[in-house]
Image: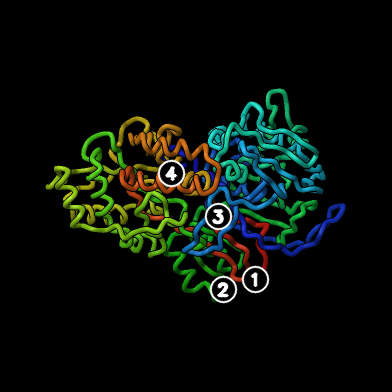
């Protein structure tokens, strides 16, 4: 979670790369015993989607099963992710929207869970009701998708359902593609339900019940998780077994890759990453950037009082930051500088955005010719723990226009959240990760104080009636040209107001055995194991 307690879970998308394994026709055929070992900094403490959201919940996507999944983007540092409404089939094979915004889905036939339970429309209906009853995220997302929460699903036939809405929305397909709105094996859950736990959340905390390519075979919280291939799945992954091990030390994870005892890791410090980039090939290990963003490191400004209440001051700060220099010092040049409200990962071309002369002129016009002092709060985990170097660079840069930046470092994101809730902080630097992909959703989530009381806009006192009206129209407009025009209009408003100074998009590392391929770029960075296979 970010320091403001915003949700850091998100949706995943996958490259449609065919796995190679045995087929299962009419029964379970066990694929060859191939094992993939992934080392992660943190495992979730709770495997049920209703558990408290945390960064580690991205792993839950590895065995989830959704009606649709977002369209993949080819991996690479210049990746542009598609809009949230761009999806591909998974449990649904086709769909169409009515004029009123309802979606009718034809479901995949012959699908079974790992226990052999058949997938039907009843599972879809029960799963959405479970999401509404238990998920901490679903009510918010379903409201943006205009889902009719009183009558969300109509079962039309054994393999057909209609998702009912109160009106069109550009976000419904994106919401249905997110793992927290996945489809569960209702028979398996109901077999473990009790009077005090009707949705079997306690059982779900340590087990899985989906129709995807894998299921949870064993789980030790904060230690180890083992996935096995679903013998009945229509997807036949190359790797029969996936072992996911919690290893907090990035150095230990890199060492395991290099000695051949692991196949993949990420989120190591940049010195270790550079070492693998330079020397890993001798050990058949490669290092690459899957993508930059959509997580953005952003300087969030309290616009409710003081110098930051002036839009001229905020524009001056935006022009006084040399993002390329920061990226070079902190991220070895791998972070993509961001100036505008919408990051480049969603197709927004970023200007240079660095002009000290114009910054000084704007400060003078705002009445701050001699500058002012400003506190910025960050947590010690910023920049992978390299916050001191980043803050020193920012202090030096801002001093060039007369602004005295006073950094305050707190222990972690939770402590920063507590401070933010107790006080009106001048500004904070935080990593902002969207729940769903797409420029429109990012604008609503970050800048629309009217719909999300925990958004940066709400926390920092930013309100713009024109923007809220545009975003309100966006929420009730079907995906297409009209919604894209509304997004572009909203971007212009936010960029003119500068409620936050975006710094850069965070790079997503991929350190893996060089003979393994199938990785993709995802709106929520995640390793999607079912699409991995040996390089050919």
Q: Name the residue located 78 percent from the left edge and 60 percent from the top edge.
A: 31
In the rendered view, does 38 fall on the left or right side of 402? right
Q: Residue 51 sits in which quadrant?
A: top right
Give how far across and how far down residue 217 sits, in percent. 72, 48
Considering every residue shown, the one lying at the far left of the view is 370
Q: Quadrant of residue 71?
A: bottom right
- The answer to whether the residue labelled 1 contacts the one labelled 3, judged by CB atoms less than 8 Å apart, is no
Disc 3 residue crowd, few under 14, some 14–19, many 20+, Cα 10 Å = many
Between the C-alphas of marks 3 and 2, the distance is 27 Å
Task: Identify the mark nearer the N-term, 2 or 1.
Answer: 2
Q: Is residue 177 visible?
A: yes
Q: Nearer the viewer, mark 2 or mark 4?
A: 4
Residue under circle 1? Answer: 535
Mark 1 vs mark 4, CA separation in Å: 38 Å
In this figure, which residue is indicated by the disc labeled 3?
522
Compared across the picture, whether 39 is left or right of 441 comes to right
Report which residue position mark 2 lands on.
283
Q: What residue is drawn where x is 64% and y is 45%?
A: 220
Seen from the viewer's position, the closer of residues 98 and 276 is 98
Q: Is residue 455 above or below residue 223?
A: above
Q: CA distance from mark 1 to mark 3?
A: 20 Å
Residue 258 x, y percent position in the rendering: 55, 68
User: Regarding mark 4 in the picture, which secondary structure is present there?
Assistant: helix
Circle 2 — which element? Answer: helix
- Of labels 1 and 4, earlier in sequence is 4
């Amino acid at each position: 979670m970010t320091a403001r307690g915003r949700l850091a879970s998100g949706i995943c998308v996958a490259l449609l790369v065919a796995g190679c394994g045995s087929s299962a026709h009419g029964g379970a055929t066990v694929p060859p015993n191939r094992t993939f070992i992934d080392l992660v900094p943190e495992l979730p403490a709770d495997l049920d989607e209703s558990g408290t959201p945390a960064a580690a919940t991205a792993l839950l996507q590895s065995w989830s099963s959704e009606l649709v999944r977002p369209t993949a983007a080819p991996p690479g540092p210049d990746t542009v992710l598609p809009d949230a409404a761009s999806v591909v089939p998974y449990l649904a094979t086709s769909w169409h929207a009515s004029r009123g915004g309802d979606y009718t889905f034809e479901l995949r036939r012959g699908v079974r869970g790992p226990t052999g339970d058949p997938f039907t429309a009843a599972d879809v209906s029960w799963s959405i009701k479970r999401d509404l009853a238990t998920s901490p995220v679903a009510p918010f997302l379903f409201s943006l998708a205009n889902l009719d929460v009183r009558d969300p699903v109509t079962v039309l036939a054994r393999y057909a359902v209609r998702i009912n809405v109160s009106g069109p929305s550009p976000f419904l397909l994106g919401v249905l593609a997110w793992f927290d709105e996945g489809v569960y094996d209702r028979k398996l859950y109901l077999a473990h339900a009790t009077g005090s736990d009707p949705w079997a959340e306690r059982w779900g905390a340590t087990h899985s019940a989906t129709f995807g390519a894998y299921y949870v075979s064993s789980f030790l919280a904060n230690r180890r998780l083992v996935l096995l291939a679903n013998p009945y799945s229509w997807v036949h992954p190359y790797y029969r077994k996936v072992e996911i091990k919690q290893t907090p030390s990035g150095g230990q994870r890199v060492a395991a890759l290099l000695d051949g005892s692991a196949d993949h890791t990420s989120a190591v410090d940049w010195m270790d990453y550079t070492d693998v980039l330079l020397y890993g090939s001798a050990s058949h290990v490669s290092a690459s950037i899957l993508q930059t963003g959509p997580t953005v490191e952003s300087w969030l400004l309290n616009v409710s009082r003081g110098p930051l209440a002036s839009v001229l001051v905020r524009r001056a700060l935006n022009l006084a930051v040399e993002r390329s220099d920061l990226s070079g010092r902190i991220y070895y040049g791998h972070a993509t500088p961001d100036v505008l409200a919408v990051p480049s990962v969603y197709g927004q071309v970023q200007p240079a955005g660095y002009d000290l002369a114009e910054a000084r002129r704007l400060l003078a016009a705002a009445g701050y010719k001699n500058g002012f002092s400003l506190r910025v709060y960050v947590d010690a985990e910023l920049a992978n723990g390299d916050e001191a170097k980043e803050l020193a660079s920012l202090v030096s840069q801002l001093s060039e226009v007369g602004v005295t930046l006073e950094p305050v470092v707190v222990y972690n994101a939770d402590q920063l959240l507590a401070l933010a809730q107790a006080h009106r902080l001048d500004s904070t630097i935080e990593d902002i990760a969207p729940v769903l992909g797409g420029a429109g959703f990012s604008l609503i989530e970050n800048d629309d104080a009217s719909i999300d009381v925990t958004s940066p806009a709400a926390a920092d006192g930013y309100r713009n009636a024109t923007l809220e009206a545009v975003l309100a129209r966006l929420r009730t407009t079907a995906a297409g040209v009209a919604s894209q025009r509304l997004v572009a209009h909203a971007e212009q408003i936010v960029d003119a107001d500068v409620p936050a100074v975006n710094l850069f998009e965070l790079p997503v590392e991929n350190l893996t055995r060089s003979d393994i391929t199938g990785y993709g770029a995802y709106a929520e960075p995640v390793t999607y194991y079912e699409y991995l296979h040996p390089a050919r």
